[in-house]
Image (tube, helix red, strand yellow):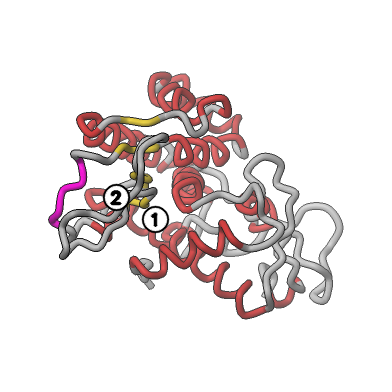
Amino acid sequence: MHDPLSDEEFGLLDDLLLETPGMDRAMDLCALDGYLAALACSPIRLSPEQWVPWIWDIEQGRAVPQFSGDAEAHETFDLILRHAHDLAWTLQSAPEDYQPILMEGVPEGEDAGECADPDCGHQHAHEHQHPHEQAHDHDHSSDQTLFVDTWCAGFLRGVALQAEAWAAFEDAEPAMLALLRQHGAPDNQGRTHLPPEEHARIEERLTAFVLAAYAFFVDQRVAETTGAAVLTGLPDTPVRTGDKVGRNDPCPCGSGRKAKRCCHA
């Protein structure tokens, strides 16, 4: 079922990623969106234990989130998986609607404050801009800058999980991954600020990049997947690595939950 997240759910997911104890190096919403886009484009299926840990720890994939309980853990996973499904569905069935989630904000050193428009209600601090927010007709472009580094870093993490497969795409389209590395490299984190006149251009380039990557791998991806996995970009049967995980063992994805209540449910 195609069930995209609402604006409120996007905000909740971002809060869960950034405020859950034990996830100091977790992806924010923008990085997660880039990461899931890379996984949706990639030709090879990965099991949850292969790709989920990097959400909690984008640098090493080792951190274990300390959820307040099963309800919070389930809510977090549900939001992540729904967004992953929505991305994969959009890329396959409605590519013309695809847009990356990028973050807008006030450049460092400037004061954040409420918008002068009393009907807007936006704070001029860091805000995530995603397709569901296009209903706002108030233009913030005069004082907002666009931060694309975390989205690019998230996508690059997804590429790194399948570097050999993505090497073929880089050989065919070297400029596209070079664009992501320009903005998403670790030494650029927090410093890639694009002025208003560049917003539309970079959004168009990132959108074109994702659509090109998805199309490039389409034949391999269809050959690798069956049934619902073609739609979701997620494994219909998890691929287990290493020792067999018992249903009462901790889930290998790092959620801290028992396997039978998590990826092996």
Side of 47 relative to 171 (left or right)? right
Residue furthest to the left: 137
Residue 69 in sight from this viewpoint: yes
**Vertical position of residue 37 compared to residue 258: above or below:** above
Instruction: Point out which mark residue 98 bears.
Output: 2
- List x then y, in percent, for residue 34: 45, 44
* Dot 1 amino acid type: Leu
For this orientation, the residue located farthest to the right is 243
Say what amino acid the circle numbered 2 marks: Tyr
Residue 151 within the magenta-colored segment of the rendering: no
Mark 2 or mark 1: whose residue is earlier in sequence? 1
Question: In this image, 24 relative to 218: left or right?
Answer: right
Predominant secondary structure, magenta span: loop
Is 58 on the left-hand or right-hand side of 234? right
In percent of width and height, residue 41 lies at: 45, 44
Mark 2 residue crowding within 10 angstroms, few (<14) / some (14–19) / many (20+)? many
Q: Nearer the viewer, residue 250 or 91?
A: 250
Q: Nearer the viewer, residue 129 or 257?
A: 129
The residue pinned by badge 1 equals 87
